[in-house]
Image (cartoon, grey):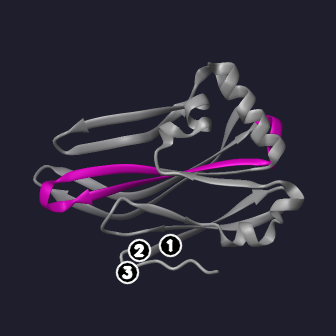
Amino acid sequence: MSLKLGKKFDRCYKIKVPFLDGIYDLGIFFSKQSSFVLYDINSISKNLCEEKHGIKISMSKNLEASKFCETFINLHNYKKNNLDIINQFHSIKKEYANDIKLVLNETITLFKIETKNKEFFDILTIYGLSMNAYDNEFLYIISERQNIVQQLSRKIVRTTGIQISTSSAFSLLNEYYENKK
């Protein structure tokens, strides 16, 4: 079954992600006119037999609801007349700095908009994080879309996450999550 997108998704950025013993394509679909992001995991799910490796893939539109983000990540929210940010990746929590590492950090500038006395950049930023104990068995990708609404001179920032893990890495994440409480 192939992924079917509407006309609004007019951009795709593909990255190669290492997982277990292979490298897989992860597609990130978005629109130049919106902050919505969607993942294409066909390459990963086709090539990894979920029953054999116990692979778990989950997507999060609300990063605050993700066990990984709630446990390990500081998120940033901010609202002002010309800026609307929800769940922007800020940092790895200090107490987990030795347990989590940033393995990917890419920014794609789509275009620049100049208004009155300001410059806005419409961008897509991709962060990849992994747990040190399960380096090639756990991957959490955060895609941050900074979209400009020209008529309002406003930047809208939204994030979407995808978690790819083996059963054993997922169990460790659950242990961290339960221990945090």
Q: Quadrant of residue 69?
A: top right
Cβ atoms at labels 2 and 1 below 8 Å apart? yes
- Would you name the residue on which mark 2 appears? 9
- Would you name the residue on which mark 1 appears? 12
Cβ atoms at labels 2 and 3 below 8 Å apart? yes
Q: Amino acid at mark 3?
A: Lys
Q: Identify whether 63 is placed above or below 57.
A: above
Q: Nearer the viewer, residue 172 or 121?
A: 172
Q: Is residue 21 visible?
A: no
Is tag 1's residue or tag 3's residue first in the polypeptide sequence? 3
- Would you name the residue on which mark 3 appears? 7
Q: Identify whether 75 is placed above or below 125.
A: above
Q: Indicate which label's residue lies in the foreground, 1 or 3.
A: 3
Does the stretch in magenta take in 63? no
Chief secondary structure of the magenta portion:
strand
Which stretch did the figure color magenta?
Answer: 132-159
Q: Nearer the viewer, residue 19 or 64?
A: 64
Q: How many marks?
A: 3
- Residue 26 at x, y percent in the picture: 64, 66
- Residue 45 at x, y percent in the picture: 73, 67
- Residue 53 at x, y percent in the picture: 86, 56
Tell me the SS state at disc 1.
strand
